[in-house]
Amino acid sequence: MKNPITSKFYRLQSVILLSVTALILSGCGGGDAELKTCLQTTSTGGVSVGSGLPGDPAIPEKSSGYKLGNKVVNSGSYMAVTANPRATQAGCEVLSAGGTAADAAVAIQMVLGLVEPQSSGLGGGAFALYYKASTKQVLSYDGRETAPAAATENYLRHISDTNQTNPLPNLGNSFASTRASGRSIGTPGAVKMLELVHQEHGQKSWETLFDPAIQLATNGFGISGRMADAIAGARNDLLRDPDAAAYFLNADSSPKALGTIIKNPEYAQTLSSIAKGGANAFYTGPIAQSIVNKIKVTSSGGANPVAITPGLTELSDLANYRAIKREPVCTTYRTYWVCGMGPPSSGGIAVAQSLGILENFDLSASLYLPTVVNAEGGKPSIGAVHLISESQRLAYADRNKYVADTDFVPLPGNGVSSMVAKDYLKARAGLISATRSMGTAQAGVFPTSQPLGISATEGKGTTHMSIVDKYGNALVMTTTIESGMGSFHFTRGFLLNNQLTDFSFDPSDSSGLIANRIAPLKRPRSSMAPTLVFSKASDGSRGDFVMATGSPGGASIIQFVVKTLVSALDWKLDAQQATSMVNFGAGNSVTTGVGGEHPSIDVTNSGLNDPLLAGLRSLGHTVSFAAQSSGVSTIIRSPAANTGIPVLWGGADPRREGLALGDSPR
C-alpha cells in the first residue's frame, strides 16, 4: 500500500515542477494553451506527465518485460518519442514553445541523464541524424567517445607491457574486470555533439534548455522501475565507488527502491555550468578535472578497499575532443530512401545491407506476411523470420570483419558505396536458402580486401529519441554510456561510460589484424542505428520525410531497427504496431532470437508449443526465445484517414518506459 503522506508529497512536488517548467518554457515563447497539448491521453482525458494524477505515466511502476496496451499517438505538427515520460515531456514542451528538433534533443538528453542514468548521460556518447526541411539535407553527427592519446594496443587487456594481467578489480573475467577499471572509460562526446547540433539547428537559447533537468534534479523525482532494477543489479559494483554508492544506495548500502524520491544537486550544478559556459565548461576546468580524477582512481576506498587499474586519460584528451560531421549512409529500398549512421557506427551499413538483400524478395507476398496483426503489432511468419535473419547474418559477417573507425582503418573496395551496392547485395541474397539456415555466414570479398580478423563485442546500456518539429525538421539520436551503469565510476552527478570495451580486446587473431582494435584517439565501433526514411521522388531522388526510428540494444540494435522498418514499409503497420511487433533476428551465429517477452510468443514447454519457434527449428535455426529489451521510438508521417492531410503518428516501445507526445491531432 502506498504511504498517503509520501504520495501526497510526490503529487504536490510534481505539480510544482510542472508549473516551474511551464513558466520557463513559456518564457521561451510558448504559452499555457500551447503547453496543454503535451498530454498523455487516457480514458478520462489528458494527463500531464509529472502531475501525479491517475494515468500519469511518470508515476513509478514496476519494470516489466512488455507493457500491454500502448496505442499509436496522433499529432498535427510536432512530436517527441523517448524511452522515459519525463524526457518526452521536456522535449515536447520545447517543441510546443517553438523550438526545433535540435532544441528538444538538448532538453531531452539532460533529463534522460537524470531519470535513466543507467543508459545515457553526460559521461557518454551519441550519434545523430538531422533532417533540415528547408534545404532537404540529411546531416550526420558523430559524438562517439575516443580512446585516450596514451592508449596502446594492449590497453584493455594488460595492466602494462611488463604486467600482462587483466586490469583490476579482478572480477573473474577480462570483460567485467576491464569494464570496472579506468581503462574502459572513453572521452565523452555527447555534450560536444549536442552543442554542435544546436549551434547549427537550434533556435532557443542553449541555457534555457537545461532548465527542466535542473529543476527535476533539484526537486527530485520518483525512481522508475527500470532505474530501480539497474541499481539493484549493479549494487556490488556501485559499492566500489563512494560517490556512486552515496547517490544510488541507502545508508545501509541497500539499493534505493522503486518510487524513492531522489535528488541530484551535483547534477543540477553540473548542468548549470554547461548551460552558462557551453560545452567548454564540461571539457575544461573543474568538471573535466573531476572526470580525469575519477578515471585515475587506484582504489575503491572504504573499509575493505580493492585495487582498481586507472585509465590514462588526461585533461588534454577532453580539451582536444571534437564532434565530427560525417556523411550519412543513404540508399534506396523499394519506393523509399533510408538514411543511417556511417562508421564508426556499423548500424547504417548493416541496416542498409539487410534491406538491400531483402529487396530481392517480395516481403508483401503471403509467405512473408505476419500471421497475426493486432494492437501489439502481431506475430511474424516463419518465412519472414527465416529470410530476415539470414539477411542479417550476411550483414553482420561484413560488420564484424570490415567496419571500424574509418579515420584509422578504411572500408574495403570503394567504401560504403561498395558495401551497399545493389549488385553486391543481390549476390549475397543468392546465398540464402529457402529451406535451410546458413548458420554462420562468411564475410563478402571485395577487390581490395585485406586479411582481417573478426570482432563482434558490444554492450547494451543505450537509449534512443525520435523528434519532429513544426518546421518539418526531424532528428534521430541514439545515445549511450555502453553497458548498464557504464563503468560504475560516478562524478559530479553522472556516470562515466565503459565505451572502450566496444573495441576488440585483442589486436589480431589468426586471420590478421582486427579492424576494431584499439588505438590512440580512435573511436570504438558501434551498432547504433538512428534512421530516417524518405519517399522516393518520381525522378528517383530523395523525396518527403516519411519515418524516424531507432533503438538501444547493443549489437541487436540492427535487428530491432530492421524489424521496425520492414513492419512499417513492407507490412504497412502503424508506428506503434511496427514498434511493438515481436522482436526477431540474428547476428552472425547459428542462434536466431525471437523475443519471448511478447504476448504472441508461447514460451511454455520450452517453446515447443509455438508454431513459429517450431518452424524455425525445422529450418535448422537454433532458437532463443529469451526476452529482448529493445527501446524503439518511432514517428511516421502519413495522411490522416478523415482529411488526407499528412500528420504524425508515434509509437513507443512497450518493453521500456517510453512515451510519444505531440500537439493536438488533426
Image (cartoon, rainbow, N blue to C red):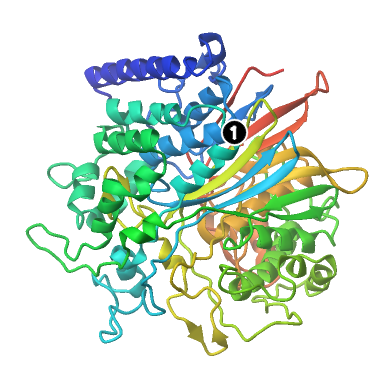
Residue 593 position within the rendered picture, expressed as x and y whole percent measured from the top left? 58, 61
In the image, taking residue 319 as reference, residue 541 lies left or right, namely right
Residue 45 position within the rendered picture, expressed as x and y whole percent measured from the top left? 54, 13
Image point 30% across, 19% down: which residue? 13
Q: Is residue 613 visible?
A: yes
Image point 53% across, 32% down: which residue? 104
Q: Nearer the viewer, residue 348 or 439?
A: 348
Q: Please say if 503 is above or below 332.
A: below
Q: Please say if 219 is above or below 159.
A: above
Q: Quadrant of residue 409?
A: bottom right
Q: Please say if 510 is above or below 608.
A: below
Q: Please say if 364 is above or below 508.
A: above
Q: Check the picture and name the quadrant holding the N terminus.
A: top left
Q: Does dot 1 land on a helix, a strand or a loop?
A: helix
Q: Check the picture and name the quadrant holding the C terminus.
A: top right
Q: Looking at this rendering, what residue extends furthest in the left direction?
A: 303
> Which residue is tagged 1?
101
Q: Is residue 117 visible?
A: no
